[in-house]
Amino acid sequence: MSLSRLAHRVADLPLKASRLGLNGSIRISSIHTRALRHNILKAASPAVLSAVKPLRPVAAIGLIRNNSNAASKDSGIKQKYDLGVVSLLPEWKEMLDPKGLKDDIVAGSTVAAVAVPLSLAIGLASGMNAVDGLNTAIVSGVICAFFGGSKLGISGPTAAMAAVVYNVIAHAGLAGLFYVTFIAGALQTLTGILGIGHLIRFMPTPIISAFAAGIAGLIAFGQITRATGLPAPPTPGVLSVLEHLTTNLSSVIPECLLITAITMGINQFLPKLSKKIPATLTAVAVSAALAFFGKLGVPLVTNIPTSLPPLHFPGLPDVSQMGFIMNSAGLVFAFASLESLLSGVAVDKIIKAKQHDPSQELIGQGLGNMATALVGAVPAAGVIVRSTLNASSGAKTRRSGLIQSSVVYGSIAGLNELLHMIPIPTLAGVLLSVASKMVNPKDIVTMFKLSPVEGMIWLGTMLTIVLQDMMIGIQYGFAAELFYAFYQRRGTPLFRGFSHRVTLDPLWVYAHYGSDVKSAVLEVSGNLDFMAVFRLDDLKQDLLSPLYFANGQKGVLEVDLRKLNTADFSGLDGLAGILSDLIGQGVDVHFTKNPKSEKFGAKLVAADKTGRLKKALDFVPPEAVKK
């Protein structure tokens, strides 16, 4: 038998196996097949390689994994009835090793320098005392450092939760906030124990973005009176604030506006000059010094005790408030969990070592929130900015999170007098700077271009959150996204999900690049909408397996989108991120040369935030694959 015919027969083995229903069950034999084919091609002459060219680019050897089922054996659900303690023990032991201690001290202290002013500002924006934000940073920081699913993740109060807390206190008081925070924490812990943390991602990207934009609007309007030195309006709400401002415009205190403007200016422009200097801490220090030495007479932070508050457990809430409390707890559970998981993903991209565990992360955040409820603080979540700062500052172990909390506590105990010198307009400026960064206009423009319908859903959800009610906005926005997803599926099997298949080694890659290059074909089919986003985790896991592009392995990936029926903004955004990361590690990604595949490919390019995927659309296959 000739070498070319033998190569063809070897290439057909997994394809024949797939026709016999053996998908996903030939991993080991495929490795042997691949090794055999390597030897064949190494021994082949250029004439034999030329004979291989007519093969379809998707003719492949290797793992064929069809992911249309709910869960595969590799990504099965794992319960954590021990709260994950057994799996965490090796990382806890690392904390006792002096190796890397200096790096952890530097990273933890750097994060604390950012956490202190932000936590004070978020506590104030929540309608509570400024110190309540610090209490959350301390308590949740310690618990999540031990039990969180991201080794270098940092937990604490977030700007997104500030508006939610303010709304809860306005309707149900501090007792209602206790139950909202405690129930949300219990739900997080239970979700993590059952191993279904990935289901939190069952939330459309436009709704997440609308929530962030709405919260940014509420924060901005909520800080207007503090930034101008005016008393709080008689009733909460955007329209009430605007009416209050126009009525009392002559009473605006210029010194407050000055302090707010200086704080925002430093926060916005200092990072462009130097990323090593903490902008928020610098802004607070400069504005506080200006207010003190200039004797501006602006209002200052008050009521900061020198220790943590005692544990408390309020009486049972009024029955009439239970519906509101449960709805609010569900909102905190969903968005605090989602932000925490996104924080874990952001840290993974920096350290590129052990990936975060979503279920373990929810256990840590849940325990942290139940503890913060007991000290009367605001809900916590994994904070993307502080977590990535911790990782990029060189943190090595979970100690850095403990050090961060210790330094924050030290600021209460040892720097109490200095904290009382911080102007209220300074914290308003900090929050206005945070709000301005919660929305990326480019992402909104991209959404309207790729999916105008979802763009209008985003706009309606955001305006409802700002002008009417947060819960109503989220509920109607989600319902609209669900309706649109099923509307897009008209003409196709309504309940058909999303599936993918990864196969090895298009033969033209060997002819063009050589036999030692890692290569694969990714074939996706079905409906790539927000209901399938968590399935992309399996897709990413397959592509980063040892058979393909693990540990920064370079290679070639062909993406075949011919069997894709529909795709919404959430699906496009998720898949574009995975492909962009692969390009970033040196994988040559391109789309199958087919009108339908290139049409969806163009949408993926538009959804890509890095601009890397444009190379995939411009890729021209070598002569070996031209028919």
Image (cartoon, rainbow, N blue to C red):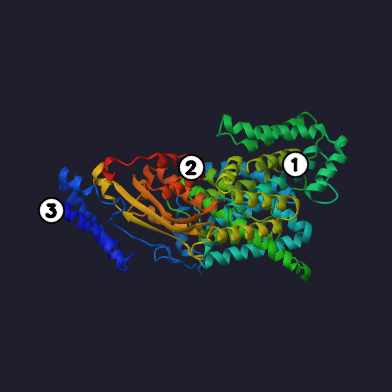
Closer to the camera in the image, 67 or 353: 67
Rendered location of residue 441, percent (x, y) = 61, 40
Q: Which residue lies furthest to the bottom in this view?
A: 319
Q: Which mark is residue 420?
A: 1
Q: Residue furthest front?
A: 491
Structural crowding at the residue carrying mark 1, measured as other residues with C-alpha within 10 Å and reported as few (<14), some (14–19) or many (≥20): some
In the picture, the quarter occupied by the N terminus is bottom left
Rendered location of residue 555, percent (x, y) = 33, 45
Ranked by sequence position, the earlier of labels 3 and 1 is 3
Q: Which mark is residue 206?
A: none
Mark 1 residue element:
loop
Mark 3 residue element:
loop
In the picture, the quarter occupied by the C terminus is top left
**Which residue in the structure is indicated by mark 3?**
2
Residue 234 as seen in the image, left or right of residue 195: right
Closer to the camera in the image, 556 or 269: 556
Image height of 545 relative to 322, above or below: above
**Which residue in the structure is indicated by mark 2?**
394
Residue type marked 2: Gly
